[in-house]
Amino acid sequence: MHSRNINSLTLQELQELLASWKTERFHARQIFSWIYQKGIRDFTRMTNLPLDLRRKLNEGLYPGDLKLLKALESIDGTKKILFKLKDSNLIEGVVIPAKGRITGCVSTQAGCKFCCSFCASGILGFKRNLDTAEMLDEIWHLKNNAPLRKLTHIVFMGTGEPLDNYENVLKTIRFINSSLTYNIGARRITISTCGVLPGIQRLAKEGLQIELSVSLHAADDEVRNFLMPINKIYPLRVLIPACRQYIKETNRQITFEYILIKGVNSDLQNAKNLSRILKGLNCKVNLIPANSIKELNIQPPKQKEVSLFQGVLLKSGVKATLRKPRGEDIEASCGQLRLRYEKK
């Protein structure tokens, strides 16, 4: 038998594999329960399976390719994990505990090709897409390193651009949404994009109730071109109408992420510009004071400037929440731990 990664198999594929071994197909559900609900991937510990099946599983399948290299825990409870892939590329995942929820932040690519100027993920360039098995392996590890070994929410906001790895990300979402695996409701799953329009348009037609988060970070093309090179391909004049159409087709609210960077996009004029382009949209804005990143010369604005920015949005009728940076003491921003490790 050829050894296969258990994470690469759907329930139906596992059932078919068991049938080829002349084993009852119903054992596939038991195996899924052990792995995805109980967090057990050691086949010898799956005590409700026949001994002969456990032997075949050990011979024919293996539990994953990710190697956990380093785990850092912040004073605020955030935990960042560095993983090594089978080809030695590095990715990161984050566990973020908060009141009433425990979120797993998942990487979708090794490196990133979009090179946003405030993000460490693209500094070392783009390596490759992650496949579904690797993302599921990542989620398994995040869950098993979370408080009470529980994840209530998943956000595809780690290293890489999810909509640039569309097929694998959507397959992963459908898998973790299943009651047979992680049973995480669609509305507790978020895709974050830098503004890949074809992906946004395609996602609108999937019939999924997932959350969409768009990294905006500027309200005019000049600033956004500087911060996000993708704006030169999909500028605001086409991005905002595409978001409006997404809202219309899905009847879902969009979240716009806006990292406040001192001296770049955090003054009152930028706040007024943002209020103007989002007027009338069913959306909310997550304001995020930037994490300091030495390599990119990025600093957050003062608290007073943050409060004034938020006030302009609220007065204009745009929902705006302030998201406190998490894990600053462990460099929890995208790509920071990976960057530090690879620079050694």
Image (spheres, rainbow, N blue to C red):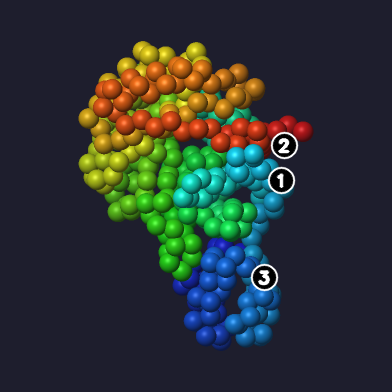
**Residue marked by disc 3:** 42
Q: Which mark is residue 70?
A: 1
Residue 207 point in image, percent of width and height: 30, 54
Q: How far apart are marks 2 and 3 (CA)?
A: 30 Å
Task: Please tell me which of labels 1 and 3 falls first in the chain.
Answer: 3
Q: Is residue 239 left or right of residue 111?
A: left
SS category of the residue bearing label 2: helix
- Mark 1 or mark 2: which comes first in sequence? 1
Q: Check if mark 1's residue and mark 2's residue have beta carbons within 8 Å.
A: yes
Q: Where's residue 292, x and y in %?
A: 60, 24
Sequence-wise, the earlier of marks 2 and 3 is 3
The residue located at (49%, 20%) in the rendering is 303
Farthest residue to the right: give it.
344
Q: Which of 321 and 246 is in front in this view?
A: 321
Three-letter amino acid code at the position of disc 2: Tyr
Q: Whole-Å distance between the Cαs marked 1 and 2? A: 9 Å
Q: In this view, does 27 lie to the left or right of 308?
A: right
Q: Dots 2 and 3: beta carbons under 8 Å?
A: no
The image shows residue 255 at horizontal and vertical percentages of: 36, 37
Q: Which residue lies at the image location 59% right of the left edge and 53% below the top edge?
A: 146
CB under 8 Å between discs 1 and 3:
no
Q: Quadrant of residue 278?
A: top left
Asked if residue 74 can be seen in this view, the reply is yes
| Element under disc 1 | strand
Q: Can you tell which quarter of the image residue 221 is in?
A: top left
Q: Disc number at residue 9?
A: none
Query: Which residue is under mark 2?
Result: 341
Please give the name of the residue rendered at 60% of the width and 22% of the height, measured from the top-left corner: 296
Q: What residue type is labelled 1?
A: Lys
Whole-number angstrom distance, CA of label 1 to CA of label 3: 22 Å
